[in-house]
Image: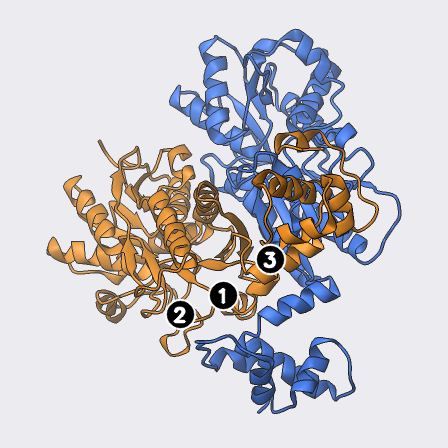
Chain colours: A orange, B blue
Amino acid sequence: MHYTEQSHTFRKIIMTKRITLADVAADAGVSAKTVSDVIHHRGRMREETRERVRNSMRALGYTTNLAARTLRTGSAKLIGLAIPNFAQPFNGNYADIVTSYAWAKGYRVSITTYHRLSQGLRELSADAYRFGVDGWIFLTDTPIPAQDNFLNQDRPVVLTGDYLSHGVADTIMFPNVEASQTATTRLFELGCERIGFIGAPANADSLDVTTQQLDAALTAQEGNSAMRLRGHLTALLQHNRSPLPSLVGACTRLDRSDGEKATLRLLDAGAQFDALFCANDAVALGAMSALTSRGLRIPEDVQIIGFDNTPDAAFSSPRLTTIDPFTEQYAQMAVDCLISRLEGDETAPTVHITDFALIERDSTRH
Amino acid sequence: MHYTEQSHTFRKIIMTKRITLADVAADAGVSAKTVSDVIHHRGRMREETRERVRNSMRALGYTTNLAARTLRTGSAKLIGLAIPNFAQPFNGNYADIVTSYAWAKGYRVSITTYHRLSQGLRELSADAYRFGVDGWIFLTDTPIPAQDNFLNQDRPVVLTGDYLSHGVADTIMFPNVEASQTATTRLFELGCERIGFIGAPANADSLDVTTQQLDAALTAQEGNSAMRLRGHLTALLQHNRSPLPSLVGACTRLDRSDGEKATLRLLDAGAQFDALFCANDAVALGAMSALTSRGLRIPEDVQIIGFDNTPDAAFSSPRLTTIDPFTEQYAQMAVDCLISRLEGDETAPTVHITDFALIERDSTRH
């Protein structure tokens, strides 16, 4: 019998024992040697026969030896995507885009979160065998130590997440500094005078930001929170404002709860601001929640801009003005880079930066 | 040298070639035979030596042969979690809880989305070898056909997502009917008279809901949208109200955009309602967005209750009253069931149903 891809839909697959090579041969109506030839990519036969054997293997769930075959050929066309977890709305959206685009390119994606691993990404990196992936797209939320660069391994890795790979792996970054500078500049254009920033990197001991930290922030080279703060401060200086610690709120996880708390801290300390630029949309949504709870109107009293253009941003009340860092382009660059490495590209690792746009909605004035 | 788990953090791992068994032996200061014994779980040696060899394998990234070992022992302690995609905020949250809990039980989780696969879950089911998983937790968003039950396979599967496994696999369900009945009953208690429902299952041809469909909905046995509608209608009948098609909005994907459109459709058709019970939080957030855009106040003009208690629900404006279906318990039941099957439990498949609570926030009156 010859089963087409579609007709599998209608087959009853009930397995009570391990499927053997002989079972596949019987199902496909060929010899065991032919099945073996297909598995090992050898022998001469019509493409139709090869396809029939593959369909039988699939339909019968001839799994164990396919795993062995994967080991032998070294490729299951499977990309690993490692993200911290799904607490950030950005991450699920990113995973969906990577998966869709990889699929269009003939690859599947296996997603793993690493926040539970004591050594985080490093541990996954050494553990690719568990997931059977050919290469990784890492979304990192912490720096990769230059002196101990675990990206330098025998499987290709593409680094995303706004940290440096120190020349070891292809790196995809958002235009953090430039886009943040644009957001803060836009708030000046909209008439704001005292623009705060929520989502600065947290000091280990305190959430109070110091003047020294703000000075140092102007030279940040990595980290989305640090780079976005840098863009914001750069715009302040261009408008002849001194960066004020009292207008900068630090966050540890950059989620909604963080953004809410940081904004309440500033308000409780008596900070006077007429606008907030936030390190990401989650923080901005938390900030909006804090402002609303204190009776402040958005955008009448305080204008707000976020960063990421996550799907939530269009459904908040009011709808959030935000930087669109072209997440689709970002995800596609990551997939393209990884596939190109898997296919043998051995040129030097490159840093790719996406384009961006400011999406003006109702949390800023029209 | 003896490396502890912690000290790996500080080791330099730069790989330029495949690591061999001899490299591991040299690093651990043992013979190649000792390394081989550790890999194959044989030989007699001090536990400390075994541990030292394992640490060297890990630190050097001795991957390929570990994959071979995984094949041999048949278990990498890896659970597969298959979800449609991350468009639903529920899904990322669910993935995080499954991962954390599985981790606490000594298992890792590999997450795969299946919306891009032409045959969806069925295709993954036949493809476990690609992901190297021992068993699956499936989150399904469509019915599993009883006559062609692909859950009946040689790897354990636990079904989540409110569809029936027809006795083939352990099934974890939310208390959809009972909890929805409670939500609608609460809206009556809060003084509502005309309670609408957003998120009914969509008719293939039209988003208009008929009286016949509402009658049929009272016997729904599966599907979260259908079962929640059933609970809602049951509460209406208990309060001597006739289910009215004009107060029921259908959705296709149950996301925010869907909820917004369905609510606008009801409003445009002139529907008069003072409350909405929504099939999930995403739909409820979309409904809130629609009401706000038409100048209706929540909860003054329309009270709203969602379902899922996703993290977003606490950060909407106003904060969303919702059913908490104990997602943590749901995820833990799924992991516990799967691990129990992996460890040899051969009792008959069971249906487990979580507890629930109504979380009252600001989208209903106090």
Q: Secondary structure at mark 1?
A: helix
Location of residue A349 in the rendering, given as x and y in whole percent from the top left corner: 32, 64
Q: What residue is at 47 percent from the left and 81 percent from the top?
A: B10
User: Disc 2 versus disc 1: distance between alpha carbons?
Assistant: 9 Å
The residue under label 2 is A144
Q: Which residue is mark 1?
A: A121
* Residue B30 or residue B197, whichever sits in front: B30
Q: Amino acid at mark 2?
A: Ile
Q: Secondary structure at mark 2?
A: loop
The residue located at (42%, 38%) in the rendering is A312
Left or right: B289 as drawn, with respect to B167: left
Answer few, some or many: residues within 10 Å of disc 1's Cα (few below 14, many 20 plus, some between 14 and 19). many
Please state if B103 lies on the left or on the right of A323 as rendered: right
Chain holding disc 2: A
Answer whether labels 2 and 1 touch (C-beta < 8 Å).
yes
Question: Distance between the Cα atoms at labels 2 and 3?
Answer: 30 Å
Q: Name the chain letter of the residue that bears numbered label 1.
A: A
**Residue B208 x, y percent position in the rendering:** 56, 11
**Which residue is under mark 3?**
A70
Q: Quadrant of the N terminus of chain B?
A: bottom right
The x, y position of residue A95, in whole percent, is 47, 47
- Identify residue type, mark 1: Leu
Choose mark 2 or mark 3, whichever is in front. 3
Residue at coordinates 71% horizontally, 24% vertically from top-left? B231
Rendered-image quadrant of the C terminus of chain B: top right
**What is the number of callouts on the image?**
3
- The image quarter containing residue B236 is top right
